[in-house]
């Protein structure tokens, strides 16, 4: 307890200065959220750039052991310096990610299918919000299958998680899954991202796309989505192409990348993550980032 003797008299009230903490919050659509939600979002989105580099390693939840992720305990720590937010299952996080890391956590909370199924769209909420709180998750990620056989149950899953998230001030990340029967058109992404946002999520993960019938489609998806969009990496591309996709995503208004295979399946995953970081936070073009990547791997 503070010593009561010899106390200094409080006198620096600065009565001429208006209250200092009145500025708008920088994350899209989050201005009216409470402090706890904002704190989690600030852990995910860098306050300076407003963007995030997320590293997705949750593949095992339906793919089992995945090429490049055989040893999570070895892969994750070496990539950590270039990552803002780690996206994984509670099994992977608890066993393979050192808790002393200072990174944001995107906790995968839906599951229920495997590569042995034809239709991956049937999931359940597999993680209780109490466990997300125990793990100090900054957001809970739910796969959402708009237009697929499992649409209804996935929206039910999403709603349950959003409701629990509001109760305990943990943001929900709605992930747009593209069912095997879905075309990657502007129409589909406009529909899916907006439905998910209107359900009440605080951030949306979707794919970058180019639709010849709608050249500004991606920018319009971003404009019509009232919360930040982070772009999924998708299947492994040559590094140059993956960096081009990352650049076009950020140019198109995405607030980050949530990449998995295009980082961990690269033969130079550390340098690839560093190159992505330069696009997301430092304004590099894809050409500059690729030059950085080439120099780094040949150094
Ligand atoms: C989304 O479907 C899941 O989170 C995936 O496990 C993850 O997004 C895949 O990442 P990537 O497509 O970049 O390998």
Image (spheres, rainbow, N blue to C red):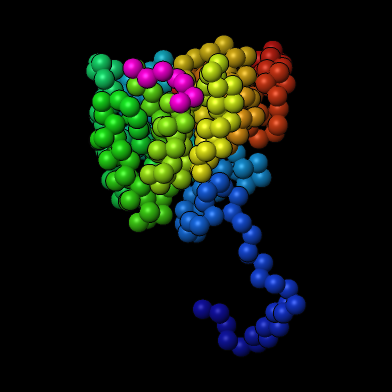
Q: Residue at x 57, y 18 (%)?
A: 242
- Where is residue 260? Give x, y as percent: 48, 24
> Which segment is the magenta one?
181-187
Q: Quadrant of the C terminus?
A: top right
- Where is residue 132? Give x, y as percent: 35, 46
Residue at the right extreme, as displayed: 16
Q: Answer whether residue 52 is visible to the viewer in this image.
A: no
Q: Residue at x 33, y 51 (%)?
A: 163
Q: Residue at x 31, y 44 (%)?
A: 159
- Where is residue 45? Give x, y as percent: 56, 43
Q: Main secondary structure of the magenta part?
A: loop
Judge whether 66 appears above or below 255 on screen. above
Judge whether 258 appears above or below 201 on screen. above
- Where is residue 224? Give x, y as percent: 52, 38
Residue at the front extreme, as displayed: 213
Can residue 115 be found in the magenta stretch?
no
* Residue 122 falls in image quadrant: top left
From the viewer's perspective, is 162 left or right of 81? left
Q: Residue at x 42, y 32 (%)?
A: 191
Q: Answer whether residue 33 is visible to the viewer in this image.
A: yes
From the viewer's perspective, is 203 left or right of 61? right
Q: Quadrant of ligand 1?
A: top left
From the viewer's perspective, is 253 left or right of 295? left
Q: Nearer the viewer, residue 214 or 232?
A: 214
Can residue 185 be found in the magenta stretch?
yes
Q: Nearer the viewer, residue 289 or 249?
A: 249
Q: How many marks?
A: 0
Q: Nearer the viewer, residue 17 or 72?
A: 17
């Amino acid at each position: 307890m503070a010593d009561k003797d010899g106390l200094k008299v409080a006198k620096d009230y600065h009565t001429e200065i208006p209250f200092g903490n009145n500025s708008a919050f920088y994350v899209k659509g989050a201005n009216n959220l409470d402090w706890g939600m904002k704190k989690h979002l600030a852990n995910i989105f860098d306050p300076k750039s407003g963007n995030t580099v997320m590293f997705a390693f949750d593949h095992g939840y339906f793919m089992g052991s995945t090429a490049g992720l055989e040893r999570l305990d070895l892969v994750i720590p070496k990539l950590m310096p270039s990552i803002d937010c780690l996206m994984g299952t509670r099994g992977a996080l608890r066993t393979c990610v050192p808790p002393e890391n200072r990174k944001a956590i995107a906790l995968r909370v839906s599951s229920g299918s495997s590569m042995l199924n034809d239709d991956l769209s049937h999931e359940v909420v597999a993680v209780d919000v109490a466990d997300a709180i125990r793990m100090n998750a900054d957001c809970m990620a739910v796969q959402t299958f708009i237009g697929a056989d499992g649409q209804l149950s996935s929206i039910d899953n999403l709603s349950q998680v959003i409701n629990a998230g509001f109760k305990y001030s943990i943001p929900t990340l709605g992930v747009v899954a593209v069912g095997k029967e879905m075309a990657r058109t502007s129409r589909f992404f406009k529909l899916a991202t907006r439905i998910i946002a209107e359900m009440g999520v605080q951030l949306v993960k979707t794919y970058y796309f180019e639709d010849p019938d709608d050249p500004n489609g991606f920018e319009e998806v971003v404009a019509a989505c009232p919360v930040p969009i982070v772009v999924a990496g998708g299947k492994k591309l040559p590094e140059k192409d993956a960096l081009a996709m990352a650049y076009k995503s950020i140019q198109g208004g995405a607030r980050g990348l949530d990449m998995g295979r295009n980082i961990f399946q690269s033969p130079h995953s550390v340098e690839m993550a560093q190159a992505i970081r330069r696009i997301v936070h430092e304004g590099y073009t894809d050409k500059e980032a690729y030059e950085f990547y080439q120099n780094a791997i040949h150094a």
